[in-house]
Image: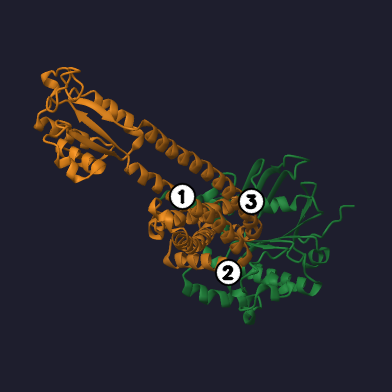
Amino acid sequence: MSKKEMLRRRREEMIEENGVIFLDNVSKAYTTGSPALNGVTLSIGRGEFVFIVGETGSGKSTLIKLLLRELTATSGSVYVMGHDLGRLRHRQVPKFRRNIGVVFQDFRLLNDRNVYENVAFAQRIVQTPPSEIRRNVPTILATVGLAGKYKAKTRQLSGGEQQRVAMARALINNPSILLADEPTGNLDPKNSWEIMRLLEEINESGTTVVVVTHNREIVNAMHKRVITMRKGVIVSDEEGGEYIDED
Amino acid sequence: MKISTLFYTIRQGFANIFRNKWYSLASVATISACLFLFGIFYAIVTNFQSIVMKVEEGVSLTVYFHSEEGVYNEKEGHFADGCVSHTPEQLPSDERLEEIGQEIARRPEVSKVVFVSDEEAWKKWATDSYGEMYAEGFPENPLAGENSYEIYLSDVSMQSALVTWLESKPEVRSVNYSAVTADTLSGANLLIAYISLGIIVILLAVSIFLISNTVAIGISVRSAEINIMKYIGATDFFVRAPFVIEGMLIGLAGAGIPLAVIYSIYNYALTYVMERFSVLSNFLSFLSVEEIFHTLTPVSLIMGVGIGFFGSIITVRKHLRV
């Protein structure tokens, strides 16, 4: 068995044992102030839909940054798709990130390019042949309900549509995990629900979805697993749980 | 890397220029300004150096040899060369004279050696002084035995070393040279070198200042884009390559514009000076526009592309660690 195959198998075993996301007693401290994360242990299984909730400064953003390997833990271990992120070399990070789709509150689209280009861009990065890109992009745009808008500049779209473009871009490479950081933060209730329904559909197709949100109404209505964070620690982790207020 | 990715990268490099028109324009203007100053300075210094070199080429020294020929001054008791008597090794045969001429010609600081026989020397002196008739009126050559070499230098600063070497030869009676001329020209050369160095340092400092400012603008324009690329899983190369191509294209444009401007200005200035001050052309010869651009074009293009290349690498590098 080749070394590559051995590593792949080890990662598979790791996922089976601990889930696609596994944090083992993770702390993250910045140079000033109290630690952003303090001894967090967490496991998210394949195909789960999880809300991470908490007030500003509770450590949610730091958690997302650790999962994307934008930051490394001060102590403890972070495993994503069986990769020990603390041991991941800088040059291995891009390939690792291709397993994860990310959606942000502010959409983070390339505003000087049209909808098609924004989505196709994610495929160009992984060097998908142009013929496949031409086939895949319209399909994914249809999935997120933007079939007729592929030529539009992103600035011409509504907030909800921009978030759909971001989701199409996140999904086009078939990631195993979709991280959504406040995906409804800039949207009205109608668009928020549409985005959440889309996330649910994506989850039903087998993708693990992790949503960081402040939106109590959505969390309480969807009856998913809810992890509540406060001051860098997990204070509750319940299947079908509810958004718990700090006070 | 796949061919399609390569073409995509190049296309994006071109597209980036138009996407960020103002940034591109600012970068081109910055590089153009620096290379314009460099080009003007280069044209002036090269011309100055060329003039000094032409003056140097005219500097010669003359070496005379011992000889028993010619008039023996009985009253003063010495030969025409001033010697009372000669040892055999002081008197060079014709072969030895030729050999010495070849040795001189082989020296690196020597550009040309001309043998002047005693007859040629007398004829020239007499003709220059009194006319041809006067020279023919003499029954014998008063400069008999005054064979000499006229030596022209390629590097005037080496004149004293050559003189020392010549004077160490037993056959050599005297060496006529002007130490003042050589020193003045060497000094001028040194001065040009110092001024060049000073101006290059100033230009470099100005360039770095201007380019770092432009790069700072570039960083603010690009940071969001680079950030998105990195989150999606782009490799450092994939992120960097379009920016590098864009930077090189900007550098190319930034070098091309001043070259075109300097070409026109130089041509115009040269024609104007030569027409208006035609008296200058007798003792000053300026380099042609082709001679200047033979070196200036590749140097400017390399500098422009280099500045664009490194500028973009530095800009992008700051944002790769996402």
- Label 1 sits on a secondary structure element that is helix
Q: Colour of chain A?
A: green
Count of numbered circles on the image: 3
In the orientation shown, which residue stands out farthest toward the right? A247
Q: Amino acid at mark 3?
A: Glu
- The residue identified by callout 2 is B18
How far apart in space, not on screen, are marks 2 and 1 (Cα)? 48 Å
Residue A45 showing in the rendered view? no
Relative to B74, is A228 on the left or the right?
right
- The residue identified by callout 3 is A70
How far apart in space, not on screen, are marks 3 and 2 (Cα)? 31 Å
- Label 2 sits on a secondary structure element that is helix
Q: Amino acid at mark 1?
A: Met
Q: Residues within 10 Å of mark 2 (few under 14, many from 20)?
A: some
Q: Quadrant of residue B115?
A: top left
User: In the image, what residue occupies the spot 15% across and 19% down?
Assistant: B74
In the orientation shown, which residue stands out farthest toward the bottom? A148
Q: Colour of chain B?
A: orange
Height in image: B176 above or below A186?
above
- The residue identified by callout 1 is A6
Height in image: B240 above or below B99?
below
User: In the image, what residue occupies the spot 14% across and 19% down?
Assistant: B86
Relative to B162, is B276 on the left or the right?
right
